[in-house]
Image (cartoon, rainbow, N blue to C red):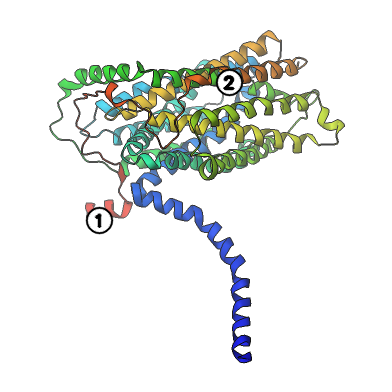
Amino acid sequence: MQEEENQEDPCGESIEENEPSKGIWDCFCIPIHWFSMLSREMHWSFVFGVVVVYGISQGLGGALAEVGTKYYMKDVQKVQPSEAQVYKGITSIPWIVKPLWGLLTDVLPVFGYRRRPYFIFAGFLGVIAMLLLSLHESLHLVLALLSLTAGSAGVAIADVTIDACVAQNSISHPSLAADMQSLCAFSSSVGALIGFFISGIFVHLIGPMGVFGLMTIPAGLVVSVGFLLDEPRMHNVSYRQVKQNFVDAGKAMWTTLRSEDVWGPCLYMYLSLALSLDIREGMFYWYTDSKAGPSFSQESVGFIFSISSVGALLGAILYQYALKDYAFRDLLFWTQLIYGLSGMLDLILVLRWNLKFGIPDYFFVVIVESIAQMTNRLKWMPMLVLSSKLCPSGIEGTFFALLMSIDNVGLLSASWGGGFVLHILRITRTRFDNVWLAILIRNVLRITPLWMLFLVPRGDPNSCILPTKSVDSKVAIDTSDAKNVELVSLVHSVDDGK
């Protein structure tokens, strides 16, 4: 008996010793199992497409473009912060007309394909626009804005095309709608984390124009997605029906929008974004000012945005594993409240109170930006899930794009409203006396959407929000063959060509 006990004790100790390592390994495998589950349920190609568009094009490429454009406007074009804020809104106009891109992808096939040509066109548009910005040393401001807008249009078209796939899969797999939005957010956050980390270094080494040259790589990858797309070709497509397709799609969209369960959340999403004034260009000029601000270098700005992207990533993870099943109205209440209160940290920074408490500027800015990114992500995620729940079948790409364009109109309103506030308060390239007042006005307006939460339905992501009786899509194009959008591996493409 003693020998048996002695034999059992070591075994028990070895099991206990292995338990911690097993737990760590399980934590490491959780995202791998999650990716595998999504790939199995919706095909690996869907996951790949999301990673390319959201992770590389929007995340990494968007981070490089954001920092590069800030320094391009400040150092090359030498514009005022209020002007830079307005120009930023102009370059976002292609995102406002997203319903047009979505309508084209849904009802106007090119050579029998609904998705592939739009990926290819979007990628080439981005490549040409970025090459023009990177190769022309003294580009006029108007032409620079046109090029930046064209590059933004390329990203927007690719975004609409992949969003159509997300909305389509949200209809066929309703229980995974939140997971798909988490995949998009996770890819975007990781891409932004890497992009911001290297952005400051590249701006310092090759300048903002060199960064625009690097932007041709994400655009080229979008082109490759279009060429690798295994989309069933539709035969006997009558282009004479295109006009009727547009009319039918418009009627279906109008019928859906007339429902109170749809226009109410749309109105709330617009107001919550429009009332959150965007004054980031003014803050950027203050960050880099040597007298009034902390005078951050290019590398420091990139590192700050990179580390703050971890906040967005944590927000996506927190939503996926802890908050995704909560009711929309309850979650939006707390996230909007925290979002408004967290903005007061900017006020502490601008008034230099952090230095009185012995907190260095760099460390405090990282904390402020991380909290802002996390709360903004937590506020944004339920809106995306709710939007995907409102899309009628048959025009899911168009309607999701319409909802996103409403959000982008809100962002444009916030950008131009912030530029107006910066102009009224006379905040310039060298004068920052009233930055604290702009921050205070912004924070007060962030709280006001709480009074309009009654517009948001009480349902949760697992419930059906869209009223089926009010939606009757009669779009002429047959979408039955496009149950899922799949990408063919390059190996298969090569084998077929032999």
Q: Looking at the image, is 463 positioned above or below residue 452?
A: below
**Closer-to-camera residue (157/318):** 318
Q: Quadrant of residue 254?
A: top left
- Mark 1, Cα crowd under 10 Å, few <14 / some 14-19 / many 20+, is few
Percent x, y for residue 401? 38, 26
Secondary structure beneath dot 2 equals helix
- Give the residue pinned by disc 1: 495
The residue located at (54%, 57%) in the rendering is 28
The residue located at (63%, 77%) in the rendering is 13
Q: Looking at the image, is 122 positioned above or below residue 438?
A: below
Residue 257: which disc?
A: none
The residue located at (47%, 55%) in the rendering is 32
The residue located at (63%, 87%) in the rendering is 6
Q: In which quadrant of the rendered image does the N terminus lie?
A: bottom right
**Closer-to-camera residue (106/42):** 42
Residue 209 visible in rendering: no
- Give the residue pinned by disc 2: 450
Q: Quadrant of residue 431?
A: top right
Which amino acid lies under the numbered mark 1 shown in the image of this protein? Asp
Q: Looking at the image, is 192 positioned above or below residue 93?
A: below
